[in-house]
Amino acid sequence: MAQAGSGTMDVTFPSDTEILITRTLKAPPHLVYRAWTTPELVRRWWPGRRGQMTVADMDFRVGGAWRYVMVSNGEFEVAFHGIYREIVPAERIVHTEIMELPGTAPDSEEGAVLNTVTFEPADDGGATIVRIRTDAGTREVRDMIAQSGMEGGVREQFEIIEELAASLT
């Protein structure tokens, strides 16, 4: 269990193809969800503290596409995109995710992982348990994601989301 801001973040591997990240945030689910789904707020948290977001395109509906691009502090560009498959307001978002490597078309779904994000009220009612379950499809892809520095980036994202959600009250 790793310390992250005012809470802890757990990263586990429930199967050979999955990563599960769990974090409790000190803000109610509707505000965490708002920070997660509003493009101008996503621009503030998605790059963590590792760069600046240059694109936050979100057609936030089932079947809609999203695309995020950031320029890291190391001056290189990183882009991801996907399709929303399921949306239950303030409860659950299911979407594909593809890291755009050279030669990847911006609308390609080839090699996509499937992310399921859930927002659950914590016992005290004023906090939210967020779970991100990534199905990478293979153990090799799961391990590549786990070894990419993802954990540190997600920890930073959660710290910023918690601050943003608290400021929305």
Image: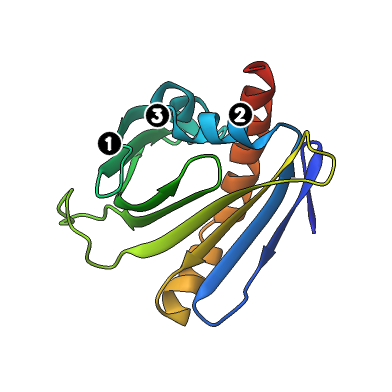
The residues bearing labels 3 and 1 have C-alpha atoms spaced at a distance of: 17 Å
The residue singled out by tag 2 in the image is 31
The residues bearing labels 1 and 2 have C-alpha atoms spaced at a distance of: 19 Å
Callout 3: SS: strand
The residue singled out by tag 1 in the image is 59
Position of residue 159 in the picture relative to residue 35 (left or right)? right
Q: What amino acid does circle 2 point to? A: Leu
Image point (53%, 82%), residue name? 16
The residues bearing labels 3 and 2 have C-alpha atoms spaced at a distance of: 21 Å
**Nearest to viewer (mark 3 / mark 1):** 1
Give the answer, above or below, for where 53 lies relative to 168: below
Marks 1 and 2: CB-CB under 8 Å?
A: no
Residue 32, image quadrant: top right
Label 1 Cα neighbours within 10 Å, binned few <14 / some 14-19 / many ≥20: some
Q: Earlier in the sequence, mark 3 or mark 2?
A: 2
Label 3 Cα neighbours within 10 Å, binned few <14 / some 14-19 / many ≥20: many
Give the answer, above or below, for where 132 lies relative to 122: below
The residue singled out by tag 3 in the image is 53
